[in-house]
Amino acid sequence: MVNESEMAIVQERIKDAPVNIVELIGDLGVAYVEEPMDADSSGRIDYIDGEYRITVNSDQSRQRKKFTAAHELSHYLLHRHMLHRRGHLDRLFSSGGQANPSSPLSPKHEVEANKLAASILMPREAVKDLMVWANYNLHDLADRFGVSPAAMEIRLKVLGIDLEQEAAKEKSGHVGIAYQFDR
Ligand SMILES: [Zn+2]
């Protein structure tokens, strides 16, 4: 279901951290608004008059707004064919992929959206590259990507990266080849 030319735009946009998710959404022709929503709502995506529109709860923290925007964008990229008849509301969800489905999507769709959102905001190569810059500090690394430390922690687990181990490796001079590209 993924559209190749759209994914090319995504790939181009995520080269530099932090990713400007609002600009990326605009590049893809999706409307984006922030407005106050119920306290337990993160955001939603709707299809109105032939146009997709992402709404993010403006009362959320900067980091959560960013993750919510990436989550809704991921629904657009992966599931938009399912959203024509009615929109999809996301209540508070964990960036880790805990399901919080709202019709017409299922827990499986929520996990897919969270996974894609994490890889858009925290691309593998950029994380590997910048963890050295961040001196293997979780908070500094999360800050550099504009995400919460909790979101970065989950992403590192998915990527199989243990910051303490990586720091110890560097100390002992065994820097992994994968991290030795210059950028
Ligand atoms: Zn969702």
Image: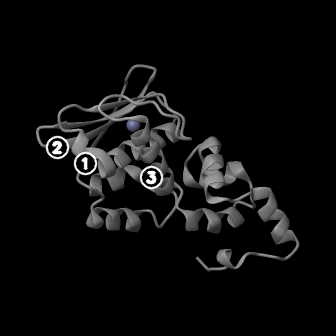
Q: List the residue tagged with mark 1.
A: 30
**What residue is shown at x 56% (from left), y 63% (from top)?**
124
Relative to 54, is 129 above or below?
A: below
Marks 3 and 2, the one that precedes in the sequence: 2
Marks 2 and 1, the one that precedes in the sequence: 1
Q: Is disc 2 surrounded by few (<14), some (14 to 19) or many (20+) residues within 10 Å?
A: few
34 vs 90, nearest the viewer: 90
- The span from disc 2 to disc 1 (Cα, nearest Å) is 7 Å
**What residue is shown at x 62% (from left), y 80% (from top)?**
181
Q: List the residue tagged with mark 2.
A: 51
Q: List the residue tagged with mark 3.
A: 116
- The x, y position of residue 95, in whole percent, is 54, 40
**What residue is shown at x 27% (from left), y 61% (from top)?**
3
Evaluate if marks 2 and 1 touch, with contact meaning CB atoms under 8 Å apart: yes
- The span from disc 3 to disc 2 (Cα, nearest Å) is 22 Å
What kind of residue is marked 3? Leu
Relative to 62, is 161 above or below?
A: below
Can you name the residue that lies furthest to the right here? Answer: 172
